[in-house]
Image: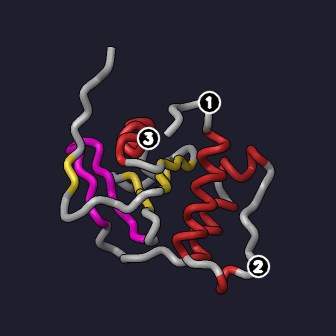
Amino acid sequence: MKRKIELTLLFRSPICPVIVVSRDRLYSSKNLEGLVRYLLLSGPLDGENYVKVIDSTGEEFWYYRDRGILSPGFVFKKWTKRRIIDLFNESINSKEIGMNYPNQSISSKRLSRIIGEISELIAGHNKGTIWET
């Protein structure tokens, strides 16, 4: 039986692909339908009451599970290339596949490309264990 899921987007939608920063691992989705599925699986990091979502522009969004609301974050606006790479390289996903995202030549890569490539690594690792998106 499928469960009906309602997600309220405040202000604007994240631009896909997105990375979901969950308590136990990273998830990635190429569309909003997949994002909703991964938000249901995700728990917030310790000490936070929301799940972080990073869109392809590096903007952080916050998902409040108790209210079903996804909105742009308000603490800082954009993630840097280095911070996104470090997030992946320090994640359980990276450890499980035994691969880090390379730190060299990041100045010549666009932020959206880095997020896209890391999203593909995450999606490839999670494929078959969760929903494919």
Residue 12 vs 42, above or below: the answer is: below
- Inspect the image, locate mark 2, and give the three-letter code of the amino acid beneath it: Gln
In the image, the segment drawn in magenta is 59-72
Label 3: element kind: helix
- Taking the spot 51% from the left edge, 32% from the top edge, the residue there is 131
Q: Is residue 128 left or right of residue 49?
A: right
Q: Which coloring applies here?
A: secondary structure
Rendering coords of residue 87 (x, y %): 60, 63
Q: Which residue is mark 3?
A: 38
Marks 1 and 2 sit apart, C-alpha to C-alpha, by 31 Å
Residue 39 occupies which quadrant of the picture?
Answer: top left
Q: Which residue is mark 2?
A: 104
Marks 2 and 3 sit apart, C-alpha to C-alpha, by 30 Å
- Inspect the image, locate mark 3, and give the three-letter code of the amino acid beneath it: Tyr
Name the N-terminal-most of marks 1 and 2: 2
Name the N-terminal-most of marks 2 and 3: 3
Q: Which residue is mark 1?
A: 128
Name the N-terminal-most of marks 1 and 3: 3
- Inspect the image, locate mark 1, and give the three-letter code of the amino acid beneath it: Gly
Rendering coords of residue 96 (x, y %): 74, 44
Rendering coords of residue 112 (x, y %): 52, 70
* Label 1: how many Cα within 10 Å (few below 14, some 14–19, many 20+): few
Marks 1 and 3 sit apart, C-alpha to C-alpha, by 14 Å
